Amino acid sequence: MDELISSMSPNSPHILCFSEHHLKNLELNQINVDGYKLGAAYCRQVVKRGAVCIFVQKYLKYTNIDLGKYCKDQDIEVFVLKLKSTFFNACIMQVYRETTGNFNLFLNRSDDVIKTLYKVDWKLIICGDINIDYLTDNDKKRQLDAVLLTYNLSAIVHFPTRSQGYSSNAIDNIYIDTYKFINYTASPLHNGLSDHDAQLLIKNDVNLQLQNHRIYTIRNINNYSTEEFKTRLSYESWGSIFSYNGNIV
């Protein structure tokens, strides 16, 4: 997690959304992300891996909406965070669907969730790994788009989010109402930490920073991180250092 935050510094996003964190509730609550707190999460009940979570910068005000009754492992894993500020009100919906999941169930429950959230004066952001490729024309893409268009939502990620060998696809996406989000940019965030590239949504006309508020990234040093550092050092090859005859300053 430290590597991820460092790769985005100094302009760290206000909200971090993760798919497939693979953790249980107890494990997730022990994750420390400098400058952030765990805002919302769904952890699988039966099947291993998968799941979604959202981290929020510590000074932002929000509430989360428990959508557990709509969730089913592998078919639809979803949680919503409601962000409220003087300048920007939005619902952020993080969702994951496994490739082998029941697509019709995903479609119907997604519709039910959005229906409960939708308000004319609120902005809705849906993001996540839905395993539907938006770089190709396919039936699942058409069906999902048809549901989302009833709420005036459309996909804004049209670049590859995952590449393997000579092939690439866009199975991760962000959906917004482009009539409400006028001044925005969506771009890939390459960090080499996952087999999926992150997607970055920037709302250019909104400033959520508090006056005189600054975020500092510091290294978390404790017994665990010290032992982990020693372990990583033990895997390094030091032959070139010990065989060097020159002066080391």
Image: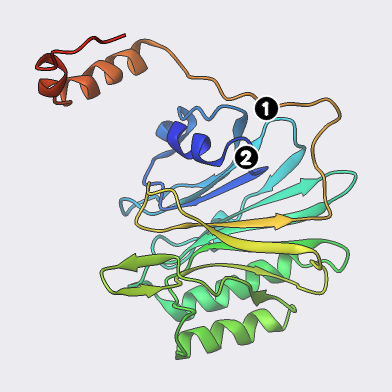
> 10 Å neighbourhood of mark 1: few (<14), some, or many (≥20)?
some
Q: Is residue 148 above or below residue 142?
A: above
Q: Is residue 37 above or below residue 110?
A: above
**Amino acid tagged 1:** Ile
Observer-nearest of 193 and 177 = 193
Where on the picture, by quarter, is residue 174?
bottom right
1 and 2 marks in contact (CB < 8 Å): yes
> 10 Å neighbourhood of mark 2: few (<14), some, or many (≥20)?
some
Residue drawn at (40%, 11%), measured in percent from left and top? 222
Residue 188 at x, y percent in the picture: 53, 60
Residue 23 at x, y percent in the picture: 38, 41
SS class, disc 2: loop
Q: In the rendered image, which quarter contains the C terminus?
A: top left
Task: State the count of labels.
Answer: 2
Observer-nearest of 182 and 83 = 182
Q: CA distance from mark 1 to mark 2?
A: 9 Å
Observer-nearest of 124 and 118 = 124
Residue drawn at (73%, 43%), measured in percent from left and top? 63
Which numbered marker is on residue 12?
A: 2
Observer-nearest of 216 and 90 = 216
Q: For this view, does 139 lie left or right of residue 176?
A: left
State which tag comes first along the sequence, 1 or 2: 2
Residue drawn at (65%, 58%), measured in percent from left and top? 201
Which numbered marker is on residue 73?
A: none
Residue wearing tag 1: 215
**Amino acid tagged 2:** Ser
Where on the picture, by quarter, is residue 27?
top left
